Image (spheres, rainbow, N blue to C red):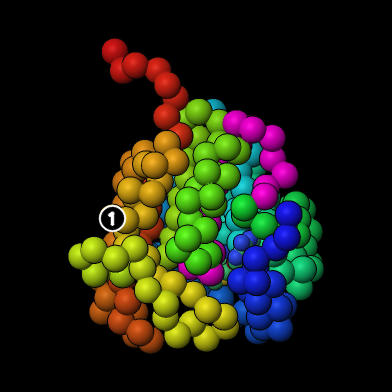
Amino acid sequence: MTEPDSLATTRAAYDAVAANYARDIPGRYHSSPLAHAMIVVFAELVRAGGGGPVADVGCGPGHVTAHLSTLGVSAHGVDVSPEMIVLARAAHPGLRFDVGTMTALTADDATLAGVVANYSIIHTPPERLPETFAEFHRVLAPGGHLLLGFQADDHPTRLGEPFDHSITPAHRYSPDRVAELLLDADLTEVARLVIAPGEDAKRGFPQAYLLARRPTGEQPE
Ligand SMILES: C[S@@+](CC[C@H](N)C(=O)[O-])C[C@H]1O[C@@H](n2cnc3c(N)ncnc32)[C@H](O)[C@@H]1O
């Protein structure tokens, strides 16, 4: 299958900034309780469900993968940028990091306890979200959890809009519309956290974390 132009653009852009990103972003993540609040909840749900492998897709330099690991989750990272993967492996030598794309994961069907995409679906064009969510559904085991973090759009009707991301083209997305697309992919919303726009000093965008689950298929008693 030929790769979309957007993926090649994303790869080249993140390869170019990988060293600076790895220097600046992990510290910001660890010093912001709101930025990792839902990661902690996600890890607890994965552990409560009996554990299993978790993919951090669009992992960048691997700080979220490593955080999940310290929280007792068996996490590995996947990123389309080879430079990011080099840096992730160097920073976290005990963890697995693979070059790859979130639309063609190497995991077998229904084998993952969880998938995290922390600020990585923002580089997926709107028309490619359905196939991306179908891939997340494919790899998740029944009862497995998905956590999406992204810049949010609070427009009442649209799915999303492009914004001036400093690295490469990106969209911010409507949490409600993303939740609808997840449901179309048979992924049911469990919870969400929306951080107030005023907390984003740079652009004034809300930040959304959507937690969803692949249904078990079992009827509740
Ligand atoms: C904004 S960074 C987020 C990195 C990290 N998750 C974090 O929280 O800091 C977006 C990352 O997603 C990766 N990415 C974007 N689209 C991707 C795709 N389709 N498949 C795999 N990785 C992708 C980029 O290479 C980049 O490392």
Residue 98 left/right relative to 6 = right
- In the image, residue 189 sits, relative to residue 25, either above or below, namely above
Would you say residue 106 sits in the magenta stretch?
A: yes
Residue at 71 percent across and 78 percent down: it is: 12
Ligand 1: image quarter: bottom right
Place of residue 142 in the rendered image (x, y in percent of width and height, measured from the top left): 50, 28
Which of 182 and 209 lies nearest the eye of the viewer?
182
Residue 37, picture quadrant: bottom left
- In the image, residue 219 sits, relative to residue 96, either above or below, namely above
Which of 40 and 137 lies nearest the eye of the viewer?
137
Residue 221, picture quadrant: top left
Residue 37 left/right relative to 12 = left
Q: Can the viewer see residue 2 in this picture?
A: yes
Task: Specify the amino acid type for callout 1.
Answer: Asp
Q: Check the picture and name the quadrant holding the N terminus.
A: bottom right
Question: Tag 1: Cα neighbours inside 10 Å, few (<14), some, or many (≥20)?
Answer: some
**Residue indicated by mark 1:** 176
Residue 24 left/right relative to 87 = left
Which of 37 and 185 lies nearest the eye of the viewer?
185
Residue at 25 percent across and 68 percent down: it is: 154
Residue at the far top: name it. Answer: 221
Place of residue 207 in the rendered image (x, y in percent of width and height, measured from the top left): 35, 68
Residue at 69 percent across and 72 percent down: it is: 8
Label 1: state its secondary structure.
helix
Would you say residue 220 sits in the magenta stretch?
A: no
Residue at the far front: name it. Answer: 2
- In the image, residue 28 sits, relative to residue 110, either above or below, namely below
Residue at 47 percent across and 60 percent down: it is: 127
Place of residue 139 in the rendered image (x, y in percent of width and height, measured from the top left): 60, 38
Place of residue 59 in the rendered image (x, y in percent of width and height, measured from the top left): 62, 61
- Magenta highlight range: 104-123
